[in-house]
Image: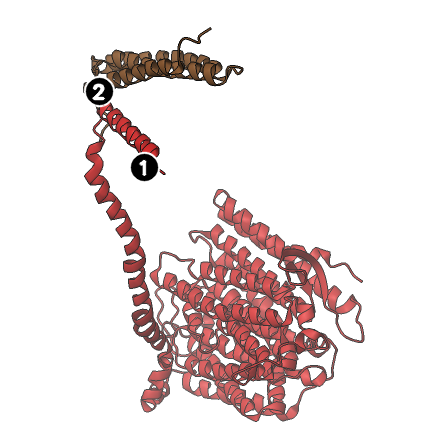
Amino acid sequence: MINFGYTIWIPLLPFLMFLLLGLAGNKLKPKLSGLLGTCGLAIITLLSYITAYKYFFTSEKIDGAFQKITAFKTTWLQLTDNLYIDLGVLLDPISVMMLVVITTVSFMVHIYSLGYMKGEKGFERYYAFLSLFSFSMLGLVLATNIFQMYIFWELVGVSSYLLIGFYYQKPSAVRASKKAFIVTRFADLGFLIGILLLSFNTKTFDFITLTDPAGSAIAQGSGIAFLGLSVMTWSMIFVFMGGIGKSAMFPFHIWLPDAMEGPTPVSALIHAATMVVAGVYLVARLFPIYSVSAPVALEVVAYIGAFSSLFAAIIACTQTDIKRVLAYSTISQIGYMLVALGVSGYGGHEGLGYMASMFHLFTHAMFKALLFLGAGAIIHAVHSNYMTDMGGLRKYLPVTHITFLVACLTIAGIPPFSGFFSKDEILAAALHSNKLLFAVEYAVAGITAFYMFRIYFSIFWGKETQYHETPHEAPATMTIPLIILATGSVFSGFIPFNQLVTSDGKAFESGLELAVAVPSVLIGLIGIWIAYIMYRKETAIPEKLAATFKYSYKWAYNKFYMDELYLFITRNIIFKHISEPVAWFDRHIVDGTMNAIASVTQSASYRIRGLQSGQLQKYAYLFVTGAVLLAILFIYLWK
Amino acid sequence: MNAGIPLQYFLILAAIMFFSGVYGFLTRRNLITILMSVELILNSVNINFLAFNRYLYPDKMDGMFFSLFVIAVAAAEVAVAISIIINIYRRFTTINVEDVDEMKY
């Protein structure tokens, strides 16, 4: 048995860094605080790699399966003898994989931000928040029990809120941060209900006990039914509601595009690579329960994922803000991961979808972070988010151009880039279990290739735009992370995930399925080809198409009016018919009672205040009279 | 030794003293006189203590001690009261209780 006790420092170090930068940051030089934060991240990145190496290659396997190791554990809250809340570190294939993903992307973003955020007001505050985020996200993936996960789940929500609202003088950023926080918080209400239901039925919070497929916890509660579904199914659906919120799935996707108001590296870290996949991670973490005792909930996961991926991909085709396109693309890709989980079974080759989902999570983190950081470099160069202000940039930004192209090819699923392998596994898993989902995801693969190359061509080729000042390539602090991530995007497809991260911890055989791989590459190429025709040179085709499909284009351009729908529901229904009566009741009945007591006291005292005349003997007279009266009362009348 | 004097006599004397004190406290305007009235009240209580102690519990000393306490406290109280009166005089140049009525609504 290898000692993994040091892993506790992986989340703790960023936390200490947060305290240091948060409390003493304004006394340090901005550059120093940035370097400190980056060094802290460098150390834990190294620690995570060591952990991953030790876990995957030297730790002992039992029956060919990776074991779940509790590296550190302390009881935080003892509720009853067998119901308690721990804080600790749990190592298993998915948490170790997430460690690598989070620290790598976070480290890249830290380096990148040294260049991108240079000279910004609140530089040290930015790094403090980044550290806080890294701490919370690492705590989330390493959680030993569902309640610890919930605590850190909320913490990532808070750090996301703080970072979206980093430019707190910009009203739109403030609005976006509040929107993100409230929407995800609302979804977390479902998560909490789910946790309570789940732990009430299984009498435990602990992940190892909960997710033991042969254990008793899973069998509990499946007998009790409500509205035709077992309690277990209900609780898992509620838990997944939290995942819908964090992962920005339909119908809680509305916060993610607005969250792009934050600094671009933050979008890369939180809103593309790490935090938004927390929902996927949650389902993967509780996967044995979903698979064994709540298959209906798993179907819900699959259909929500599929719908969101299609929905977001269509919207992505019409947006002109480059970061928003990427945001919708993120929603779409997370939908992919959820579909893969939803169609997966437990154990062996049945668990292909599970493996594919984790695989895609890994590759997606690399290429989506790369896309966002590339977008950041472009925005840095032209000072605009809108594609209409860009064009012909390939001459000015050679490094960004190449890395961005790599990322686009990866997401479009062109071999031998990593996205091809992971997407292929997902499509194969879908094909074997649900033809409808396969068809949807297959179509989405084509749309994805189209909209990614739409932005690629219109930014780097397309019309020659006249710039006020010649755009210049980003500094080395920004291009180096791009190159590293591009390398990751190219080669991470060759990591044998079927040997390492599987639903039951055992390796299984899976190869490339040509029947899936060939058509998926073809549709990707078709998407790229259409984008090439439409956007390679400035053409009138996009406008013509938009005019032909006027109404559907307008719907998609306005994001299917989801924001308006939400506003209508909240303003005209919830605020008007629930909140306002409640506010009225509070103001007039609750406050009214208190105010009435106060005003009665006041007016009574106003009337009798003449008694306090300042005449000492008057007081004495009243006192003596009172005493005499009391004496008479006690002697003669009190019988 | 005191068989000739019944307890009631002491009580009547104490009552007269007490109510003279109360009367003086309520009617006099001079703060010094009011202080003297308070002393009268205290002493009437002392007489009661001693008389009851002597007649009801001749073998106990509690009443005596209580009177001693009252005398000691009264002495301290007079010192405090006089100094307050002196300060009032400095502030208002009068010791007429009716003129000292700042502490009101």
Residue ID for mark 2: B100
Residue at x 38%, y 57% (from the top left corner): A168
Hey, which quadrant is residue A148 in on the image? bottom right
Q: Is residue A14 above or below residue A25?
A: below
| Colour chosen for chain B | brown
Q: Of circles 2 and 1, which is in front? A: 1
For disc 1, the chain is: A
The amino acid type found where label 1 is placed reads Leu
Nearest to the observer: residue A413 or residue A303:
A303
Q: Position of residue A388 (x, y in %)?
A: 36, 75
| Colour chosen for chain A | red
Q: Residue furthest front?
A: B4
- Do discs 2 and 1 belong to a common subunit? no
Judged from the image, the secondary structure of the residue bearing numbered disc 2 is loop
Q: Position of residue A337 (x, y in %)?
A: 57, 79
Are the two marked residues, 2 and 1, in contact with CB atoms closer than 8 angstroms? no
Quadrant containing the C terminus of chain A is: top left
Disc number at residue A637?
Answer: 1
Nearest to the observer: residue A516 or residue A256:
A256
Q: Is residue A516 left or right of residue A570?
A: right
